[in-house]
Amino acid sequence: MGAPEIAYAQSGDVSIAYAINGSGPVDFVFVHGYISNLEVEWEDPGHVAFFERLGSEGRVIRFDRRGSGLSDRMREVPTLESRMDDLRVVMDAAGSPRAILVATFEAASMTMLFAATYPERVAGLVLFYPLAKGVWAADYPFAPTEEDYREEFELLRATWGRPEQAERFIREAAPSVAGDPQMVAWAARMFRQGASPGAAIALRRMVMSVDVRDVLPSIRVPTLIVHTSGKREESAYIAERISGAERVELTGRERVFWLAQGFPEAIVRFARGAWGEPEPDTVLSTVLFTDIVGSTAKAAELGDRAWKDLVTRHHALVRAQLDRHRGREFDTAGDGFFATFDGPIRAIRCAVAARSAVRDLGLDIRAGLHTGECELIGEKPGGIAVNIGARIAAKADPGEVLVSQTVKDLVAGSGIAFEDRGIATLKGIPGDWRLYAVANPASQTLPRGSR
């Protein structure tokens, strides 16, 4: 069959290339780790066979991530939030309300966050060689160290797209075809057409910023984790933290999805069982609480009528920022707001903008943010994550936007700066909590294409 037609979806001001093959009742969205090029990919018979096998069960939607392949190139580090936006707009453009997400390597971290945030759009997750954190830590010893990355970047600058890079890649990741000159030539072409050396390094820097470990328990969709013996410990770590996750270890030493023996069959088997599962009744959200500092004294100073007018103007300014940043208002008890967001960068941006806006009224607000699993009580979110957000807001100083460690980890790579506020106890919440204040308001700008 001929190569699928290339189309484009618009994510902010970034164009994302996508293609569709196959037909049927199930939608598969394949999310590449590292780099890809939809046209070069279709030049390899192994890729064609893999995607046609999935296409015999349903539609297969593939796309080149921002900075790679046929999508717009960029040199800045893409955030998890902007990449979730890209996935969502591709699904919308392809007319896919719900899909099985199949992701490889570090792309798995974004799809895990997507599945927890938009469970109504994810029928199931298939993760091939997933990672939950990009850089080595004592409690996550599976990832490369920062020194490993520095050495890798130097090697990429020196050999990107050259035969020696392709030969090394094939030897390490696809030993069954090592020495095949056609495969080496194809791999070198894929590297050159997939990204420039600078774009490739930017994508790898994005991997360094990943840390979605706190998100894993919030994933409630059916999940399949696939690996070979070389990644058993990391895959087991992730599977143990996702409720009900299934883990399959394939035979062989292949670390490329299209040559991994039994991988397409495992996806098809999983999809047939997962497709009819009900949607979860929880969702990962970033909760925002704000309140006016010194409201009692201000009300006494102004009198009831003037205070009521001032609060009305305050509410209008805050609501304007909620609308701008896709926040959803749930409560305005007293003189504060409770709202949720589908991304922590947008939530921080909203809080910072609201703080600036109300200062023109002579008011100061404090704000607290936390990202966690929320129970859906009707349409209103509840549960401990909401309580944590409220308690963090109560700890904020006047004019301060205070966030949890989880929020800070999820916005890594965004350029948002923080000041460590140390360990705190939150009333009624077990454990100790490290909190951070958002710093440098002038620098709180969303990456291009993320709104």
Image (cartoon, rainbow, N blue to C red):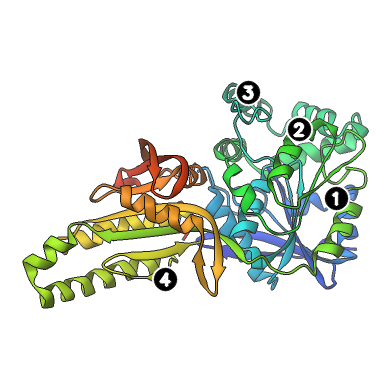
Give the secondary structure at mark 2: helix
| Mark linked to residue 347 | none
Q: Are marks 1 and 4 in contact (CB under 8 Å)?
A: no
To which residue does mark 1 refer? 47
Of circles 2 and 1, the one toward us is 2
Of circles 1 and 3, the one toward us is 3
The residue positioned farthest toward the bottom in the image shown? 305
Q: Are marks 2 and 4 in contact (CB under 8 Å)?
A: no
* Upstream in sequence: badge 2 or badge 4: 2
| Mark linked to residue 330 | 4
Q: In the visual, does 107 lie left or right of 306?
A: right
Q: Which amino acid type is shown beneath numbered disc 2?
A: Glu
| Mark linked to residue 148 | 3
239 w.r.t. 95: above or below: above
Percent position (x, y) of residue 90? Answer: 65, 64
Q: Which amino acid type is shown beneath numbered disc 1?
A: His
Q: CA distance from mark 1 to mark 4?
A: 47 Å
Q: CA distance from mark 3 to mark 2?
A: 19 Å
To which residue does mark 2 refer? 233
Q: In the visual, does 96 lie left or right of 417?
A: right
Residue 65 visible to an observer of this rendering: no
- Label 2: few (<14), some or many (≥20) within 10 Å? few
